[in-house]
């Protein structure tokens, strides 16, 4: 087995360890997209690990973020970053995330095997995400973000920029998609922001327990659900831009979209007094929706019906 083949095998195996959801969705993509999207997810996961690590102060997180960007851009030896992380994350409890960081040279070798335009899109994504999260490292507090504008900015640097990266690599792969999405690139940002808003609302109890809130101060949960619904409307239009001939891309996007819709529905029902409903989806719910996507992805009408029915509770 070649070094690159072994590195790609590691990428697939560690993806299964750090994210069951993305390990389910990324393999649906065409092979040339699966590799670069899986690679980007792992790099983003490292940024997330730095942000979420409770064993580090804000300045250490900012320094590590800057070091990580230099590593991805090829401006410093990866060993410098992994050595810094070994010290800073010594008390970090997630062994899979620590393993991923220690194997960053393997992940970067896979990135180097992608074509130049894909690499440029990934580098832009990681730089914006890392720099953006560094901005927010010193703003973590129990009260929340300053206002709605800060909230939207946070959702952009965490996930909206990923939507932009995906749009770039999808357009490189499919000229038909490139034509359909032209002048509508903002839909990709809304798509990513919708997914991040879902995560913030879903994880807010755990965040609050560790003394952090990513919700905007003075904005009610009802209003946040309405905003998320508006972002999901844009995400729906984004999916419509993907040609039906690209079933892998459509299904990848529809899975992420649909799981967000179903999660927000449960959050909305809890908010309206159905406290017995869990915010997080069960494995059986995810499995049923996964099967449903095999059929629905071929029909814009079915996708629309799914959204109209399941997202009704998000409206004020």
Image (spheres, helix red, strand yellow):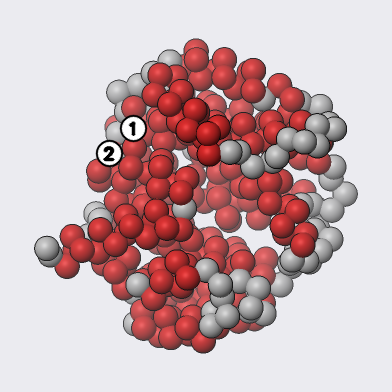
Image quadrant where one finds the N terminus:
bottom left
Left or right relative to 253: residue 51: right
In the picture as drawn, the residue positioned furthest to the right comes out as: 218
Q: Which residue is mark 1?
A: 248
Left or right relative to 76: residue 316: right
Residue 39 is situated, as x and y percent measured from the top left of the image, at 35, 57
Categorize mark 2 by other alpha carbons within 10 Å: few (<14), some (14-19), many (20+).
Answer: some
Left or right relative to 274: residue 193: left
Residue 32 is situated, as x and y percent measured from the top left of the image, at 25, 45
Q: Secondary structure at mark 2?
A: loop
In the picture as drawn, the residue positioned furthest to the left comes out as: 1
Report the number of numbered marks: 2
Q: Is residue 164 visible?
A: no
Residue 152 is situated, as x and y percent measured from the top left of the image, at 68, 49
Q: Are marks 2 and 1 in contact (CB under 8 Å)?
A: yes
Q: Which residue is mark 2?
A: 30
Quadrant of the image occupied by residue 131: bottom right
Depth check, front residue: 236 or 167: 236
Image quadrant where one finds the C terminus:
top right
Q: Is residue 262 visible?
A: yes
Left or right relative to 242: residue 188: right
Inter-mark Cα distance, 2 to 1? 6 Å
Residue 309 is situated, as x and y percent measured from the top left of the image, at 64, 18
Q: Residue at x 12, y 65 (%)?
A: 2
Depth check, front residue: 31 or 27: 27
Tell me if residue 145 comes above or below residue 54 in the rendering: above
Q: Earlier in the sequence, mark 2 or mark 1?
A: 2
Quadrant of the image occupied by residue 81: bottom left
Categorize mark 1 by other alpha carbons within 10 Å: few (<14), some (14-19), many (20+).
Answer: many
Q: Secondary structure at mark 1?
A: helix
Q: Residue at x 59, y 42 (%)?
A: 195
Q: Residue at x 51, y 86 (%)?
A: 87
């Amino acid at each position: 087995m070649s070094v690159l083949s072994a590195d790609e095998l590691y990428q697939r195996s560690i993806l299964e360890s750090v994210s069951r959801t993305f390990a389910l969705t990324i393999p649906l993509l065409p092979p040339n997209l699966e590799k670069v999207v899986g690679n980007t997810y792992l790099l983003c996961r490292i940024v997330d690990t730095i942000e979420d690590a409770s064993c580090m102060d804000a300045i250490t997180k900012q320094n590590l973020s800057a070091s990580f960007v230099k590593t991805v851009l090829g401006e410093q030896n990866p060993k410098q970053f992994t050595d810094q992380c070994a010290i800073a994350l010594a008390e970090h409890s997630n062994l899979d995330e620590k393993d991923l960081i220690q194997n960053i040279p393997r992940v970067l070798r896979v990135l180097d095997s992608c074509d130049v335009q894909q690499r440029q899109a990934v580098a832009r994504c990681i730089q914006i995400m890392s720099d953006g999260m560094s901005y927010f490292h010193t703003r973590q507090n129990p009260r929340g973000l300053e206002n709605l504008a800060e909230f939207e900015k946070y959702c952009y640097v965490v996930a909206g920029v990923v939507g932009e990266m995906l749009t770039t690599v999808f357009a490189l792969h499919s000229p038909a998609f490139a034509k359909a999405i032209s002048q509508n690139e903002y839909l990709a940002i809304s798509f990513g922001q919708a997914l991040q808003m879902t995560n913030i609302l879903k994880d807010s109890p755990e965040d609050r327990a560790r003394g952090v809130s990513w919700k905007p101060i003075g904005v009610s949960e009802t209003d946040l659900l309405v905003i998320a619904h508006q972002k999901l409307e844009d995400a729906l239009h984004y999916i419509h831009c993907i040609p039906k001939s690209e079933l892998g891309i459509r299904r990848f996007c529809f899975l992420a979209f649909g799981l967000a819709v179903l999660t927000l529905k449960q959050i909305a029902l809890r908010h309206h007094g159905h406290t017995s409903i869990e915010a997080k989806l069960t494995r059986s719910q995810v499995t049923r929706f996964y099967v449903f996507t095999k059929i629905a992805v071929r029909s814009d009408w079915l996708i629309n019906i799914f959204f109209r029915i399941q997202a009704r509770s998000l409206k004020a």
